[in-house]
Image: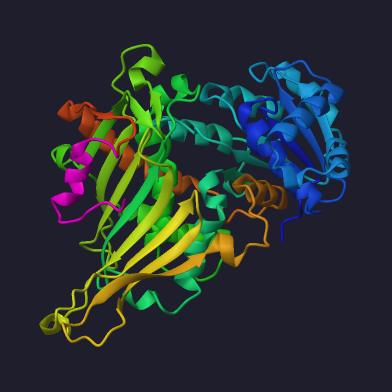
Amino acid sequence: MTQPAGKLLLFGATGDLSQRMLLPSLYGLHADGLLPEGLTITGTARSDHDDDAFRAFAGEALAEFLPADRKDDSAVKSFLERLHYQPLDASKTEGFAALAEKLGDISNGLAIFLSTAPWLFGPTIKGLQSAGLACGNVRIGLEKPLGNDLKTSREINDIVASAFPEERTFRIDHYLGKETVQNILALRFGNSLFEPVWSARGIDHVQITVSETVGLEGRGGYFDDMGSLRDMVQNHMLQLLALIAMEPPARYDGTSVRDEKVKVLRSLRKITPAEVPHLTVTGQYTGGAVNGKIVPGYLDELEKPSSTETYVAIKAHVDNWRWQGVPFYLRTGKRLAERRSEIVVQFKPVPHSIFADRGGLLHANTLIIRLQPEEYVRLLVMAKQPGLDREGIRLREVPLNLSLDHEFAHARRRIAYERLLLDLIEGDPTLFVRRDEVEAQWEWIDAIRAGWEASDMHPKSYASGNWGPSAGIALTERDGVTWNE
């Protein structure tokens, strides 16, 4: 059993991610007594703070981003006492000696959360090594982006592996920390109801949608380099696909779960350049209205020409025994009609309807797993409407609902980073992404991007506030499938 780390080091401690997610998450763990006793949290960034200034900065972040019911003056005060700070220019090796001195004795273990620009991975890892901060009791958590294709991803992973072996490397995908995402495993492998039909025998198709109503939100430089395919599909959506499609693991641990996920990712059918125009759709939003508010187009926000996609839809296949012939439709985009992350599993219709002669119309069962903004699992089933049936049997689709917000109303809904930070501190790798998973994802994504380039595909325009370009609708309609909207 891995021992919890005695110290936590946060790179990028004064950035937006730290203010909105990391500091509130660590406070939540502290307030609930889940952090190891005596754990110190040292922040580092270019900002020229001392301990007191960083504590004041953290206090302001908590005041702004903590929910009102979580604010407790006594808990905030004791949490801030855990915090320390050391300024650092991570591009220069010489600054790491002072960082090591600030951390002090790390014999009880050190966990590092590293969020940095890709070009800084090399200097940062070299600096950690030079200061003795990469020894056997140090583990490192890596926040994306970890490259922008297979080649650069391998380069970064090689740099990290020169100091941290795989068992001490924790690649973060915050979607895996979401409660409903983990409930996919509970739903599939904790119930005997679904497994007999969870295959090409019983499932017609699967839809995965991650839609946003926001635009660039100050991330123009980063997003324009990445686009929706690399920003959302390569990590979050392929991880969701892997959880839906994976075989039952032998046990719930980091090795077994990730072994099964990587098998799925390696089984994704490569989309060839000739198939790319027929199996993928790209789009870029123009001006429009979202939630009743007029919003500008992508190029207006970016203030320069760009062919970066803000929408992508893909028809994918998993070429293995379980899923042969079952299409997986993936869709993500910015400035769409509503904010939603969900998985829709469409089952096949019953082989024969006994109600057809009596006028009863059947719909195939549908399972909807909503990840955000609401969290629920909904199974749509057929039921008979009350009545004497003199004019035929009337059937209606009704939902069987498991609302996590309702069923677990008294359990606090945690930020995904709370679980991931605690797992990093405690050394549990189950919800982190292994190198072979990342590289299998990039290999599939790179083939699509190569096809776009070979086909000279350009994003189709769509008005903000809609569900993307009409070609995205046609992608499924050709198969007689309608997106769940």
Q: Nearer the viewer, residue 165 or 197?
A: 197
Query: Residue 446: percent from the left, percent from the top?
Result: 31, 36
Q: Nearer the viewer, residue 397 or 218?
A: 397
Is residue 387 shown left or right of residue 148? left
Q: Is residue 106 magenta?
A: no
Query: Residue 405: percent from the left, percent from the top?
Result: 57, 59
At 31% from the left and 13% from the top, the residue drawn is 305
Is residue 469 shown left or right of residue 162? left
At 88% from the left and 36% from the top, the residue drawn is 81
Q: Is residue 50 above or below residue 27?
A: above
Choose top left, top right, bottom left or bottom right for residue 324.
bottom left
Q: Is residue 473 magenta?
A: yes
Question: What segment is highlighted magenta in the picture?
Answer: 467-485
Choose top left, top right, bottom left or bottom right for residue 147.
top left
Q: Is residue 35 above or below residue 286?
A: below
Query: Residue 237: percent from the left, percent from the top?
Result: 40, 47
At 67% from the left and 61% from the top, the residue drawn is 411
Q: Is residue 178 visible?
A: yes
At 29% from the left and 27% from the top, the residue drawn is 284
Choose top left, top right, bottom left or bottom right for residue 319.
bottom left
Query: Residue 396: percent from the left, percent from the top?
Result: 28, 73
Q: Is residue 249 above or below residue 236?
A: below
* Image quarter in which the N terminus is found: bottom right
Q: Is residue 221 above or below residue 425?
A: above
Residue furthest top as drawn: 304
Q: Is residue 253 visible?
A: no
Q: Nearer the viewer, residue 450 or 304?
A: 304
Q: Nearer the viewer, residue 77 or 13?
A: 77
Residue furthest left as drawn: 357
